[in-house]
Amino acid sequence: MDELVTAVRKGHNRAVPPLVRKLDRAGRRAVLAELKELRKEVRGWEWRRQDKVRKALLVAGAACHTGAAGCATWIGGRDLRSWSRSPYPLLLVALGDRDPAWLGDLAHRLAAKSLSSEADYTFISELVRMAGRPIPTTDSLVQGWTERIGAAGWHGGSGRVPLAGVLRSDPHVAVLVPRLFEMPELPSQVGWYDTPGSPDHWPAALRVLAEEGVLDRSQLVERCVTRLVRGGKPGDQRFFLVLLQQLGLTEDEESGHLRDWTVLAADGISVVASHAQDVLARLDARGELSTAELAEVSGSVLFRPEKKLVRAQLMLLGKVLGRDATTAGELLPVVAEVFGNEDIALQERALKLIARHLPAADEALREELSFSAAQLGPLHRETVTALFGTVTEEAPADGPYEELLPPVPALFRLDPAPQTVAELVEEVAAQLKSRSWQPSTPGASAAASGISGFERALDGLVRLARTDRAELTEALQEALAGVWFVEHGIERQPEPAYMTTGHALALVVGSLLGRVPYEAVIQGKNRWTGTGTCAHAALNGVLLARAWEAAGDVRTDRVPFLLATPTWHTGSLDPAELVERLRTYQRLGAAPGPADFAQALLRVRRSGEEEAADAAAALGTPTGDRLAAWIRAGEPVASVLRHGLTSDRPSAGDWWQRSASGARKVLLATRERPLIQEEFPRSFHWLGRPHLPDARGCYHWGAEQCPHWTATLPEDGETLAAWLMPDLLRTADEGPRGGAWLLPPLMETGGEAGVAVHLALAYGLGARHPEDRISAVDALLVLAAQGRLDATLLGRELAVLVDHDLVKVSRLADAARTAAATGAYRTVLGVLAVALPTLLAYEKAPRGLGDLLAVAAECAERCGTEGIEPVAGLAGTAGRKGSSQTVRQAARLLAVFPPAQEMT
């Protein structure tokens, strides 16, 4: 027995199976107890030592279990599964003397676990072969099987083996392929292919096997249709559609699934719905689709947002109406549903279709359709009147138009710092255990939680380290057992460029637990953390300076609590509350930490706080005097310089840069604030220097790092917007998803909402990714609800960005449509009315202009044009030859303005 444990400790993997086979049942149980203790011990080892023994420990422990349940649990242990080469061949040898029924039980228990690798599948399939049992069909095993099939397709130097050949030779293909249709998501191996027409694509391979009789073709067809109706991820849906098309349905099979095609045309993803439409068209051509069924499915399809599907359905309806005039009474009311579509071209197509097929003698139908035609705008009024006579329009709502805006975000006070050790430890452990501490990868933490939890935990550590140090240290040691920096210490000094709230909290906890040498803490406090050329490093440097200072505070009991802990969730600090904190410091004879007090000044509310300034001055202390002077000055951290650009060309004093392609980058500069350089710690000096914007990218941008940025300057949103503008510029171009996260919290900051905030909002509305545009729309609506939106300024900034090729009109149209859909029609129209003249002046209309005009026209029809300046160039665009979307929508918008307001 000692020999086996010794072999495991030395990592002698190959020696384990024969040593286990020598032991009887009692001997294995005895060794298992020692191995369990060894497993606990190994968890605390350095990771290289763990890797050395992990495989031997897995094989020995699994083989020493006498029960299949315990063996499966041991094999599935996450702490034993980090290996480069599979230990399963050794384990099969070690388990070779077990009863076949026991092996089969083990295989099915393992299949029930989340073991989905190729090695897991190979091991389980070998166990069932040895046991003579059927293969399990769990999702995880099917996942491993697909990986095994993919790996088997490569034969070293002989090249790629055809997928159909690999599947044909697999003994479990007939059992496991049907399971692909039942899984919540397809394995990634199945959906991957080089080209859509590749013969090595899974659909093509499954078709070959169906033709050969290896798989039941009719079963594949039924399962494909069922899975498409069930829905799922778009990629999965495309896979099953391609497979269905590869199988090539017969006319009888198409007819047998008529109800399924109607469901898919109404609710399937676009490509699936298009296929269903084609099938329904074939069924109609064969006389197998009744008028009632066509009307039912058309009613759903014509409500879909995809213009291509709506056009195709109108074409199908037109064919049926042309073939059989008696269907008009049933189909034309369905066609009239398109009058509610936002696309004017589709409205015109539907109107023409009704005009072509409306029976002259059917007055009841004509009256029904006239009610639907009341939805059409002024542009179609003449045609509608000629077709239906005087149309009864919907009665206007009582009272004047009322804008629908979201409620102004309420300020939430932070809960006090945890008062007990148990509460604080729970809070700290929750934050630190939710992150991955990888010493080799700076900034590798997961998405950070809100700033509120961090600030409460930081303040709580300082408070309780002073009053309950021993209890707090012991509780943290126990709660954070296994966390990397607790076990191994913090070897590398944090860099401000990659600083997060998680790293800051870890630094303070590490100092309290002695995992950071006190000499390193002293060096960190004296270190100039605010270096760097970008705002990210500067703002992170402020956080790092505070962290080093707090790391020293928890070691020395120097201060009773932190001054900079915010009052509200935005990071803002009530000046009266800060005065009381300073008064407590004065009574206890405590000296404020330089970084802590500097951050408190940056957070304190300045506007209209004269009473708090007087109270601060009455303290008679240097810090009280500084606070009073800071509040009374009422100046932003750094004033923003307006760019002065127009949609034509830059004027003297403008700030812009050119990219490699020659496109201008519209950014903003900030003025110097000497006071910050004179009175604040060095780590804050970057904030007080004059800055010219730099469009070059840096490595500090990421949503997981950022909650503390707005909380660092919660009363200076305008300054923060100017400094982070290069990131928003990239969000509108080639930047990653999530880059506009800043905009909604930026709207909750104090201070002026000037050119920087509006320019940032303009970049966000033209962002590359839809989710970023949604963030910008949220910010727009909040700013409007606060009464701080300058629609003229925002419209002008949008025009500047479009004119300098920095945002795309089509993306602006999408954002404007989203904002208008919330009920903020006048807000959107006010912005677009300012931006449109620049866009209408182009000799060649930019892509998406028609969509933007459509949004403006929709808004104008909803809220009217009272108080809106006429749109220059609108009449000229509406009068152009042709019937493009731009011309039609310009005419639609022009029709809403009273004649006296029209401008060419």
Image: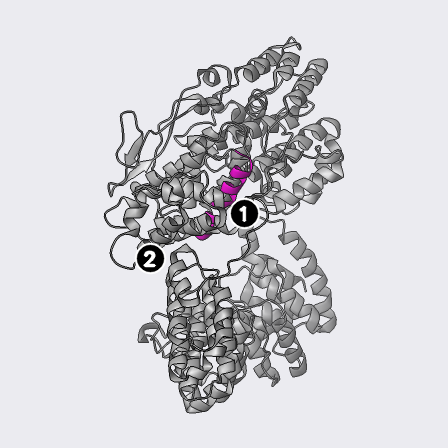
Residue type at the position of mark 1: Ala
- Which quadrant holds residue 123? bottom right
Front position in the image: 404 or 647:
404
- Per the image, the residue denoted by label 2 is 885
Q: Report whether 260 appears left or right of 286.
A: right
Dot 2 falls on a residue whose secondary structure is helix
Where does the image place residue 819, in percent across and percent down from the top left? 49, 48
Q: Can residue 674 be seen in this view?
A: yes
- Per the image, the residue denoted by label 1 is 446
Question: Bounds of the magenta span?
Answer: 770-787
Q: Which numbered mark, 1 or 2, is in the foreground of this view?
A: 2
Residue type at the position of mark 2: Gln
Query: Residue drawn at (57%, 40%), measured in percent from left and top?
Result: 502
Front position in the image: 434 or 391:
391
Query: Residue drawn at (75%, 30%), measured in percent from left and top?
Result: 468
Q: Is residue 330 above or below residue 643?
A: below
